[in-house]
Image (cartoon, rainbow, N blue to C red):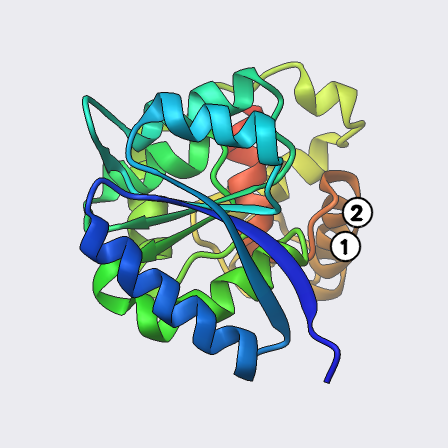
Amino acid sequence: MNNKLISIVLVDDEERFREGLRTLLTFYSTSASFAVNIVGEANCVEQVVKLAIQKNPDIILLDLELVNSDGITAIERLKDISYAGKILVLSAHQEDDWVFQAMQKGASGYVFKNRVANQLCDAINTVLRSEIYLPPEAASGFFRCFQQNASAVSKASHQLHLTEREQEVLQLLTQGASNDEIAKNLYVTVATVKAHLTSIFEKLKVSSRTQAIVTAIRLGLVQA
């Protein structure tokens, strides 16, 4: 089996956890659809930024608790240097606002540390497809926090050429409405809603409802 080789940087302030990740990733290299090359390890923001510049890894596995700083700051710094790889958060924090902040700042996914053995392989495969990874327990917290913290609608909707009706559909989507509920609210058929969603997904360059919601929030396309 010719597994795709991916480069990864491990970022965590605990050496024991990084050691466990190395073992888990080695196992993936023999059993999953990808092989892993760990090109560096870090425990602080400065180290991960340096490694991102030097190694340009495919994925950075990032804890939110770092030496003298935090993972949110690391995500911001990585975006400042135009790091083009994927940032996958591995955190013990399960609070809604931590999930929301990490995803809003630019993480490609969020995995709870106590579920890492069950979720990490799926998460890596998902972000490698340029999709957003949020397990159900993280997604629900993200959406709850969004209801309280979503930004105002910006000019991005005009730049993406979203129609007024597509903006209405997207707004209802981020509020958790089903296709049937959107149809009833807008007095259109479910088929029409699906057509609008297909157009929205194409314009946002996403392939799922979750990705559409996360992208809409990042771009300020919706409001609370």
Asked whether residue 7 appears in the rendered view, the answer is yes
For mark 1, what is the residue? 198
Q: Nearer the viewer, mark 2 or mark 1?
A: 2
The x, y position of residue 72, in whole percent, is 34, 28
Q: Amino acid at mark 1?
A: Thr
Report the quarter where the N terminus lies. bottom right
**Residue at 34% across / 46% down in the picture?**
142
Q: Secondary structure at mark 2?
A: helix
Looking at the picture, tell me which residue is in the foreground, 197 or 165.
197
Query: Quick check: marks 2 and 1 in contact, CB under 8 Å?
Result: yes
Q: Amino acid at mark 2?
A: Glu
Looking at the picture, tell me which residue is in the foreground, 17 or 88.
17
**Residue at 30% across / 28% down in the picture?**
44
The x, y position of residue 85, in whole percent, is 61, 40
For mark 2, what is the residue? 202
**Residue at 54% across / 84% down in the picture?**
31
The x, y position of residue 36, in whole percent, is 56, 63
Asked whether residue 222 appears in the rendered view, the answer is no
Q: Does 65 sit above or below residue 75?
A: below
Q: Does 26 sit above or below residue 170?
A: below
Q: Which numbered marker is on residue 16?
A: none
Q: CA distance from mark 2 to mark 1?
A: 6 Å
Q: Is residue 194 left or right of residue 8?
A: right
Q: Residues within 10 Å of mark 1 (few under 14, many from 20)?
A: some
Looking at the picture, tell me which residue is in the foreground, 81 or 39.
39
Q: Does 46 sit above or below residue 29?
A: above
The x, y position of residue 161, in whole percent, is 80, 27
Q: Is residue 220 left or right of residue 111?
A: right
**Residue at 54% across / 81% down in the picture?**
30
Report the quarter where the C terminus lies. top left
Q: Residues within 10 Å of mark 2 (few under 14, many from 20)?
A: few
